[in-house]
Image: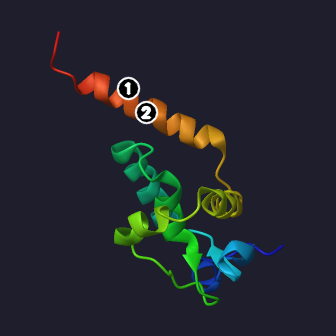
Amino acid sequence: MPVLSKDAIKQVSDYKVETVSVPEWGGDVCIKTLSGTERDAFEEGYSEQKMKNFRARFLVLTLCDEGGQRLYSDDEAGELGSKSAVVLTRLFDAAWALNAFRNEDVEALGNDSASDQSDASTSS
């Protein structure tokens, strides 16, 4: 394989869109890979918000049209979170795998958050 230049890297589209069947909704939806910046922002938000609406907050970042454009804004996570847990879990699992997240990633985030809080505590 050739060694890539910065310009060659810029030119490459490395995003992936996959289709997931949702018979409960009467069709399919698309999910996409996140950018590095989007993933970092999601992980940072996890530290602040913990598990509250965790799956829906992740899915609003990954549910997209066939061209990779998001279907939901961040503010619509609550709306999406009101849908069936069975469907959300299926979509979450597919998006989680597509984005190469591991369960250890979330566990590490939780541990980082706990240590940050104890380090910042002023109580004795």
Residue 34 against residue 12 in the figure, above or below: above
Q: Is residue 22 visible?
A: no
| Quadrant containing the N terminus in the rendered view | bottom right
Left or right, 57 with respect to 115, comes to right
Per the image, the residue denoted by label 2 is 112
Q: Which residue sits at x=33%, y=45%?
A: 48
Q: Which residue type carries mark 2?
A: Asp
Left or right, 37 with respect to 48, comes to right
In front: 118, or 64? 64
Residue 6 position within the rendered picture, expressed as x and y whole percent measured from the top left: 57, 77
In front: 74, or 25? 25
**In the structure shown, which secondary structural element does the residue marked by tag 2 occupy?**
helix
| Residues marked 1 and 2 touching at CB (< 8 Å) | yes
Left or right, 88 with respect to 58, comes to right
Q: Which residue type carries mark 1?
A: Ser
Q: Is residue 3 visible?
A: yes
Answer with the quarter of the image where residue 50 lies: top left
Per the image, the residue denoted by label 1 is 115
Alpha-carbon distance for marks 1 and 2? Answer: 5 Å
Count the numbered circles shown. 2
| Quadrant containing the C terminus in the rendered view | top left
Neighbour tally class for label 1: few under 14, some 14-19, many 20 plus, Cα within 10 Å:
few
